[in-house]
Image: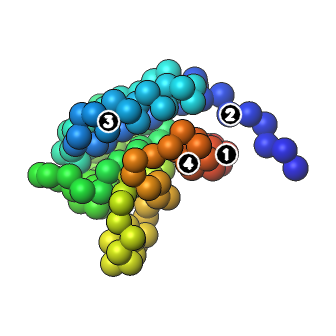
Amino acid sequence: MDRKPVDYGQYSILVIEDQPFVRRTIMQILSQIGFRSIAEADNGETGMRECIRATPDVIVCDIDMKPVSGLQFLAELRASAEVRNRRTPVVFLTNHTESEIVKKAMSLGVNGFVVKPPSFGALKERVDRLLAGK
């Protein structure tokens, strides 16, 4: 059964990453995939403000950030009364394979993981899976 192609242009995506070079690279990949609405934030705190201001369809978020980590951001997002969609799909960018971090992320309701640095194919495949349910 073939899935119909995703019209990425109709979706908005938020990239939360504290390293400017990595953030720009991810945004370029998402643009190449076909997203036209790409917002950015440099840590979990600014990412949360962006989620309150706008309502992204998908969030791509680093785990290791200061002062607010990806895990803290995800916990705050899922519990927030201020955002319009607490269940917004979140994909964590990580170089972690430690099971404790993965378990914690799963318990907070993460929707998937992509290894850093993300490749075009890995990021597209993960985002496709999340948008297929929309």
Q: Earlier in the sequence, mark 1 or mark 2?
A: 2
Q: Amino acid at mark 3?
A: Arg
Provide residue 66's location: percent of width, then percent of height: 14, 52
Q: Amino acid at mark 2?
A: Val
Q: Are marks 2 and 3 in contact (CB under 8 Å)?
A: no
Q: Earlier in the sequence, mark 4 or mark 1?
A: 4
Between the C-alphas of marks 4 and 1, the distance is: 16 Å
Q: Are marks 4 and 2 in contact (CB under 8 Å)?
A: no
Under circle 4, the secondary element is helix
Q: Is residue 93 above or below residue 5?
A: below
Q: Are marks 4 and 1 in contact (CB under 8 Å)?
A: no
Q: Is residue 72 above or below residue 35?
A: below
Which residue does the image show at 23% across and 40% down from the upper left?
19
Under circle 2, the secondary element is loop
Q: Earlier in the sequence, mark 3 or mark 1?
A: 3
Of the two numbered discs 2 and 3 in the rendering, the one whose residue sits closer to the viewer:
3
| Residue that label 4 marks | 122
Q: Amino acid at mark 1?
A: Ala
Q: Earlier in the sequence, mark 3 or mark 4?
A: 3
Provide residue 117's location: percent of width, then percent of height: 40, 47
Given residues 110 and 94, the one toward you in this image is: 94
Between the C-alphas of marks 2 and 3, the distance is: 23 Å
Provide residue 131's location: percent of width, then percent of height: 61, 43
Between the C-alphas of marks 3 and 4, the distance is: 16 Å
Q: Are marks 1 and 2 in contact (CB under 8 Å)?
A: yes
Q: Residues within 10 Å of mark 2 (few under 14, many from 20)?
A: some
Query: Any mark on residue 6, and which?
Result: 2
Is residue 47 in view?
no
| Residue that label 1 marks | 132
Under circle 3, the secondary element is helix
Query: Any mark on residue 23, and which?
Result: 3
Which residue does the image show at 36% across and 38% down from the upper left?
15
